[in-house]
Amino acid sequence: MTRAPTPIAFALMALAFLIVGFAQSWSLALTIFNYCLIAAIMALGLNIQWGYAGLFNVGLMGFAALGGLAVVLVAMPPVTDAWQAGGGDLLVAVVLGLATIAGAILARHLLPPGRTRKIAVGVIIIGGFFLARAWYLPATQAIASVNPAHTGYLGGLGLPVLLGWIVGALLAAGAAWLIGRITLGLRSDYLAIATLGIAEILLAIIKYEDWLTRGVKNVNGLPRPVPFEVELQQAAWVQEWSLRLGASAQDMAVLTVKLCYAGLALAVLMILLWFAQTALNSPWGRMMRAIRDNETAAGAMGKNVTGRHLQVFVLGSAIVGLAGAMLVTMDGQFTPGSYVPLRFTFLIWVMVIVGGSGNNYGAILGGVLIWFLWVEAEPVGAWLIAAATSGLAPDHALRVHLIEGAAHMRVVVMGLVLLLTLRFRPRGLLPERIARSA
C-alpha cells in the first residue's frame, strides 16, 4: 500500500515535466518522459534482483543488448542474398556445434569415470570445434561481404516488432538462466565480477559478429509499432488539430508519435508494476525477503536458496531485456557500441539506490528522476554557468572554459545526488516498507 510521500513524489516529477514543456518544448518533454519510462522499467528489473533477493548484478547492459538483438532478429526483413551466400553453411556450423556439445555430454554420462572418459570428451570437444569452425568462418565471411555498406548480415524474420519485445525478454531470461546456473551461489563480490565479465563477453560477441548484427556498423531503420510522422501529416484529424492549436502538421505528427510511444511504455510499466507488487506481497515475496535478510536461517528452514535466487535473477533479467528491446525500437536503430557496461549500469544502480531499494515504487521514481536529471543537467548547467559569468566578457578564458565544461555537469549532479541521498536518506526517497502483524 502506498503512503503519502509516494503520490507527492510522483506529482513533483510530473511538475518537472510540465516545466520542461513550458520552458523548453513539449516535444523534448515527451522524449525525456519516454526514456524515463524505459529507465524505470530497467530499474524495476534490478530492484527485483537486488531489492528482493540481494543479488549484486553488474551485467545489466548485456541483458539489455540481448533485448535489442531480439528486435533485430525478429523484426528486420531477411537479407536473401546473404542467406544464399552463406546461410546454409552457417546452419551446418551451428548444427555441428550443438552436436559437439551433445556428444560431449553423452560421452560424459555413458563412459565410466577415469582417464578414458576425459580423453573421449576432450577429443569430441576439440574435434567438433575445428569441424564447426571449418564451416563457420567461410560462411560468416561470405555473409559479411554481401553489400556491407547497407546489409552484410542475415537480417531477421520480418515479424511484428512488438513480438521482438517478448522475444527480447525471453532471450534475456534464457541467458540469465544459463549464467545463473554457473554464477549463483558465489559471494556477492564474486557474483558482481562474474556478471560484469559475462556481460562484456556478450557485448563483444554482438559487437564483432558482423553477420549477426552488422557489428559497429549498426542496424538502422528498425520497424516501428507506431505510424511514421510522414503518414500522420497527411491524416485529416492531425491537420484539423494543428489548425485548432496553431501548430504545424509536422509538429502535431511528431507529438502524436511520441504520445503513442509513451502510451505503450506506460502500459508495459503498469503491467510489470502490478505483477511485481503482487509477487512482493505474496508468500513468495515474503520468502524472498527472508532469504535476502538471512540466507542461513532460510536454508535451515528448508528453503532452496540457490533455486530461489535463480528464479529472481531470471525474472529481473527478463525485464531488463524487455526494456532493452523497447529502447532500440524507440531509437529506430541497434548500436552495439553504445552499450557501455560500467557507465549505464552505474546509472541504473543509482536509480534503485536513490529511489529506494526493495520498493517497486521507489525504483520507478528513481528511474524517472535520475534519467531526468541526467538529461537536463547539461542544458540547465550551461544556463546557470552562463548566468553566473554574465559579467565577464564573452571571450573571457574562465567563461569559455566553464561553458565548455557544462557537458560534465551531469556527472557532477549524479555524484551529488547519490552523496546527498546516502547522507540524508540512506534507504532511498521511498524506502521499503514491510507490513508487520500485530
Image (cartoon, rainbow, N blue to C red):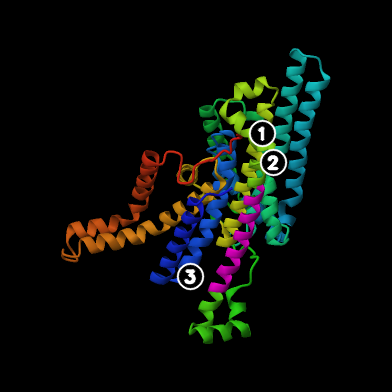
Where is residue 258 drawn, in percent x and y? 55, 68
Q: Is residue 287 above or below residue 203?
A: above
Q: Which mark is residue 209?
A: none
Q: What residue is rendered at 37% in x and 49% in y? A: 411
Q: Residues within 10 Å of mark 3 (few under 14, many from 20)?
A: some
Q: Main secondary structure of the magenta part?
A: helix
Q: CA distance from mark 2 to mark 1?
A: 11 Å
Label 3 is placed on what type of residue? Ser
Question: Is there any visible trace of residue 301 in the rendered image?
Answer: yes
Which element carries disc 2, helix, strand or loop?
helix
Residue 365 on the magenta span: no
Residue at which label 2 appears: 174
- Give, as a single range, the part of the protein colored magenta: 255-275
Where is residue 382 drawn, in percent x and y? 30, 61
**Residue 410 vs residue 278, the one in the foreground:** 278
Q: What residue is rendered at 74% in x and 18% in y? A: 119
**Residue 236 vs residue 216, the one in the foreground:** 236
Label 2 is placed on what type of residue? Gly
Question: Which is nearer the N-term, disc 1 or disc 3?
Answer: 3
User: In this view, which residue lies farthest toward the front?
Assistant: 438
Residue at which label 1 appears: 310
Q: Quadrant of the C terminus?
A: top right
**Residue 57 vs residue 51, the one in the foreground:** 51
Q: Residues within 10 Å of mark 1 (few under 14, many from 20)?
A: many
Residue 271 on the magenta span: yes
